[in-house]
Amino acid sequence: MNEPGKPLHVLFAAPAYWPATAFGGPIPVMRELAAGLVGTGCTVDVVTTSLTSVNGPRSRRTRIEEHEGLTILYTATPLNYRWMGLGPTVPLWLERRPRPDVVHVFGFRDPLGSTVAGWCRARKIPYVFEALGMFRPKLRKVWLKRALDVSLFRHVPSGAARLIACSALERDEYIAGGVAPDRIAVRPNGFPRIPRSEPGALRSRLGISNDAPLVLAVGRVANGKGLDLLVRAVAESRGAHLAMVGPDDGHGTSAELRQLASRLDVADRVHLLGELEHGRVLVALADADVLALASAHENFGMVAAEAASAGRAILLTDRCGVAELLGPDGALIVPFDADAVRQGLGLLLADPALRTRLGEGARGVADAWPWQRVVELQKTVYDEVVRDRTPA
């Protein structure tokens, strides 16, 4: 039981953790939260799998690392489906560690998070649950996800003291799924500090002149990311290039995009670069005229936050949670629609003054939402949860 005024002991349970950047925005989010909490005096442990990518090697050995002030268990992961790994040594490790004051379960429908949530309930340890955009069944195997949500994984959200939403968009998904509004806390993600980079590296790699319009899309190459809409939009923007950076999700999306570019006769202007080290992605932002996030559903969209910090012009669909913070002064926000994406991208590429204005507005939002502010919001939720569980 936490004593009043004593720093909290927090446990993170995550299906993957740094440096597993192939799994997208949630990885740097968890890392920033953990580092920020340590900075406030909290003790933070992390239990996660040993996975680093969807098709990467699985480890049959458990390792414990002390890193950035954290104790991290990378559990042996003999089996996995995508980033959902089986960690058989997790219960034993949990029993050996000091009892946490509060647990933060990230992700949904994975064995590790479900195991930790069940352990918390059995030992009456409060936990918060953050679905990372997975709460509403979507994309593949929707029928199976719905069946699992009312059976095998039902205890995970139902047993949580709070559900964390990183946007009003995600909050609405929780409510639509039957969660009472007073159980939900909205805590946005922070906007990182991006060091200024000299432009030229990406254009030089692609053989693109400085005056050729360049659109950058960053994230998993997957269905639902709107990448096909961007290919079609670039095909109608004379001379524009599209660079897509990120790992393929393993379902053939990269091949489909290449075929589409070939049919539209823009194969020489559509570049699939695969996964890049995170630092190189940040450098690539300096070359982009527009950062485009045209997703059909994105509970936040960390790449847009990074682009905002770099002062880039941003195109977003209204299905991206980060649009709520950026607003019309920090991004061009359009419906998830082929014509809307095409028109919006065309408008941005044709108007340098508009790009400059939106880039400046985006940087202003980034300055208003540093990670320190977000960490304090998260810590307030933990404090409330622990206080609610502490006998008077």
Image: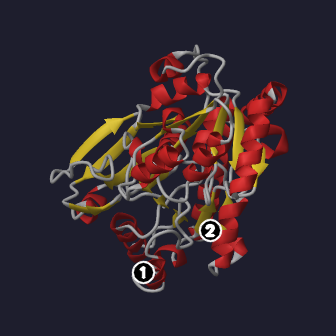
- The residue where tag 2 is placed is 388
Reading the image, the residue beneath label 1 is 144
Quick check: 206 left or right of 210? left
Secondary structure type for disc 1: helix
Q: Residue at x 61, y 51 (%)?
A: 229
Image height of 55 relative to 371, above or below: below
* 2 vs 1, front mark: 1
Labels 2 and 1 touching (C-beta < 8 A): no
Percent across and percent down for residue 118 are 39, 74
* Few, some or many residues within 10 Å of mark 2 (<14, 14–19, 20+): few
Q: Amino acid at mark 2?
A: Asp
Query: Residue at left 61%, top 18%?
Result: 196
x and y, in percent, of residue 350 in the image: 78, 31
Identify the residue at image location x=46%, y=67%: 108
Which amino acid type corresponds to the residue marked 1 in the rendered image? Leu
Residue 90 image position (x, y, % from top left):
27, 61
Q: Secondary structure at mark 2?
A: helix
Q: Is any part of residue 190 visible from this angle?
A: no
Look at the image and tell me whether residue 204 can be seen: yes
138 on left or right of 114: right
